Amino acid sequence: MFQRKNNACNIEEHDAIFQEQKVNELKAAIGLLSGRSLAYCSDACMKRYLKARNWNVAKSKKMLQGSLMWRSAYKPEEICWNEVAVEGETGKAYRADFHDRDGRTVLIMTPARQNTTSHDNQLRHLVYLLENAILNLPEGQEQMVWLIDFTGWSLSNAVPIRTARESNNILQNHYPERLATAFLYNPPKIFEAFWKTQ
């Protein structure tokens, strides 16, 4: 029993050393940063990008540089509630006032409450929610949980394909390793075909 515990500690220590080496490699590959880019590129951030690209430094660098360019142009930290409030009027997406049992921030989405058709505002609302959820993560917590309730959802109130595609792009490429888990409540039958192809 004691031997197993020692082996587990050695594996964790080896993993920590490996991860630290990869973070240092990524820092060197990215080079000097300043301003908001420097603040964004914490060790935890770099670990998320490395995990998302299976610890491949070259791929992580490319992904992180893409995010830094996107953040520089999109300025997600400057989005204010009053700019996207109309998107949240119906409660189609919001940060819950509770955490899950692991202390993670919970985002609740109800797509049937879609109330606008503005592609840009819908994306800005999503980014605002993500940034807000990240700011409200407890110390040491990196991920969040999504609860998506499809009750009342139909193709008539669905988000346009273009908006869904761009939302997916933003989530995958600029918020890697932020989603711990997503629960879909009452998903429509049309989703079954998608799941069967996976």
Image (cartoon, rainbow, N blue to C red):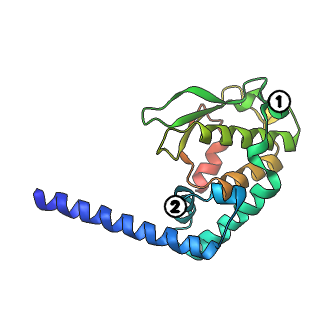
Q: Quadrant of residue 68?
A: bottom right
Q: Position of residue 32 (x, y in %)?
A: 66, 70
Q: Residues within 10 Å of mark 2 (few under 14, many from 20)?
A: many
Is tag 2's residue or tag 1's residue first in the polypeptide sequence? Answer: 2
- Residue 81 coordinates in the image, percent (x, y): 78, 32
Please tell me whether mark 1 sits on a helix, a strand or a loop.
helix
Question: Alpha carbon of mark 2 to alpha carbon of mark 1: how far?
Answer: 33 Å
Above or below residue 33? Residue 83 is above
Quadrant containing the N terminus is bottom left
Quarter of the rendering occupied by the C terminus = bottom right
Asked where in the image residue 118 lies, by quadrant, the reply is top right
Would you call the spot at circle 1 few (<14 residues within 10 Å), some (14-19), or many (20 or more)? few
Q: Residue at label 1?
A: 82
* Residue at 62 percent of width and 38 percent of height: 133
**In front: 12, or 20?**
20
Task: Tell me the kind of residue under disc 1.
Answer: Asn
Is residue 188 rendered to the left or right of residue 90? left
The reply to whether residue 165 is visible in this rendering is yes
Q: Residue 85, position in %: x, y?
A: 81, 28
* Residue tagged 2: 47
Please tell me which residue is depicted at 52% across the width and 56% down the height of the picture. 44
Q: Is residue 112 left or right of residue 195?
A: right
Above or below, 100 relative to 13: above
